[in-house]
């Protein structure tokens, strides 16, 4: 009988292995003395056939990939305990409420009993005494399989990783923002609602400025999606739209050499004089942004701070999400990562496959 708590490899599933980079899958094949030739899917299946029924070998072989098994490309949301509360002792509450010890026994529900309500299936010790990982499983729908004139259905499921740090009083849920709420509720039931968790408001802490987060990460903003400020977001009236179109048409005609400078100046003065009430005290940029639902800019791998257009629009918009590139030193090598920070969802999506060290780096910046 299991007497020690599970480690990360012990609670990993086939899907976790499938998300490893192919170079890692090839290395695992070499360790197992099986062919490293084939697609990532083929390598994953061959690996799992060797490990599935041999827990000791599974733990031994996958131990070198602890940093990657539960991370990868994922969306992350953080929750902190409310003032005066503590997470200390939550692990024991979870064991008591679950009526089994998920740190030493795995309980996988059968396809027939799995529902849309997340259930705890196993758990492991983290990288320190006060940290641990929980795995929740729930049904997301049914897949229909047709064979000639017959159809069968099989349940689709999702496994979500939750990282708990009792000492520092926060919970990290690794799933998209559509399902993060139901997992948080399931965790709350396990601790009997004795601890109130509040989602960390990334937008508030950094003033809705993606540049502030990029600076804290020593990274660069490489893309941003924003919405116009309230004074810019009202829908244009018909008269305002006509004026705006007239201005843009004249500018376009001048820049394409269809009209000379004197004609351009004459027409612009005419528009200004005929629309003093509309244009006086109004920034033309704000007028252009009026009625737009979203403004997006992308600088690929370069930084947006060098973009004159971005700097010009910045005073008139509020960030909704932003892409940030940054580097993390891992095993003496500087690795570059890309995240997408969502201010409306208060979540971070790791666009490039992450590691536990990378997630911790971002977490420490955003929570401390």
Image: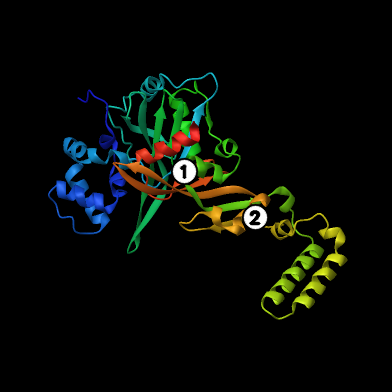
Above or below residue 96? Residue 40 is below
Q: Which residue is mark 2?
A: 313
Q: Are marks 2 and 1 in contact (CB under 8 Å)?
A: no
The percent coordinates of residue 148 (x first, y second) are 32, 64
Would residue 118 be found to the left or right of residue 123 on screen? Answer: right
Q: Which residue is mark 1?
A: 218
Q: Residue furthest left?
A: 33
Q: CA distance from mark 2 to mark 1?
A: 23 Å
SS label for mark 1: loop
SS label for mark 2: helix
- Tell me which corner region of the image, top left, top right, bottom left or bottom right, holds residue 272: bottom right
The percent coordinates of residue 171 (x first, y second) are 45, 31
Q: Residue at x 20, y 49 (%)?
A: 27
Q: Residue at x 32, y 49 (%)?
A: 19
Query: Pointer 1: residues within 10 angstroms few (<14), some, or many (20+)?
Result: few
Would residue 7 be found to the left or right of residue 187 on screen? Answer: left
């Amino acid at each position: 009988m299991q007497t020690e708590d599970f480690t990360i490899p012990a609670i990993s599933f086939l899907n976790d292995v499938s998300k490893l980079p192919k170079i890692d899958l090839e290395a695992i094949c070499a360790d197992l003395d099986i062919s490293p030739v084939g697609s990532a899917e083929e390598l994953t299946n061959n690996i799992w056939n060797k490990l599935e029924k041999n827990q000791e070998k599974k733990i031994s072989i996958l131990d070198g990939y602890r940093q990657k098994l539960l991370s990868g490309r994922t969306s992350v949301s953080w929750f902190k305990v409310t003032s005066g509360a503590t997470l200390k002792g939550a692990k024991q509450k979870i064991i008591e409420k679950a009526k089994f010890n998920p740190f030493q026994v795995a309980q996988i529900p059968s396809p027939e009993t799995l529902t849309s309500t997340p259930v705890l299936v196993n758990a492991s010790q983290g990288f320190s005494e006060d940290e641990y990982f929980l795995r929740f499983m729930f049904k997301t729908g049914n897949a229909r399989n047709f064979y000639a004139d017959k159809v069968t259905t099989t349940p689709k499921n999702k496994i979500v990783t939750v990282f708990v740090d009792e000492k520092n009083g926060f919970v990290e849920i690794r799933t998209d923002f559509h399902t993060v709420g139901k997992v948080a509720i399931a965790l709350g039931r396990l601790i009997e609602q004795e601890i109130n968790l509040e989602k960390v408001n990334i937008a508030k802490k950094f003033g809705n400025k993606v540049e502030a987060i990029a600076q804290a990460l020593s990274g660069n903003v490489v893309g941003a999606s924003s919405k116009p400020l309230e004074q810019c977001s009202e829908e244009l009236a018909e008269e305002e739209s006509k004026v705006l179109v007239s201005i843009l048409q004249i500018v376009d005609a001048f820049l394409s050499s269809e009209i000379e400078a004197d004609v351009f100046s004459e027409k612009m003065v005419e528009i200004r004089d005929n629309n003093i009430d509309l244009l006086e005290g109004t920034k033309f940029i704000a007028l252009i942004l009026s009625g737009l639902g979203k403004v997006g800019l992308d600088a690929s791998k370069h930084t947006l701070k060098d973009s004159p257009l971005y700097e010009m629009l910045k005073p008139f918009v509020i960030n909704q999400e932003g892409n940030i590139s940054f580097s993390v030193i891992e095993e003496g090598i500087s690795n570059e990562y890309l995240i997408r920070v969502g201010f409306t969802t208060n979540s971070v999506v790791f666009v490039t496959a992450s590691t536990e060290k990378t997630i911790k780096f971002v977490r420490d910046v955003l929570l401390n």
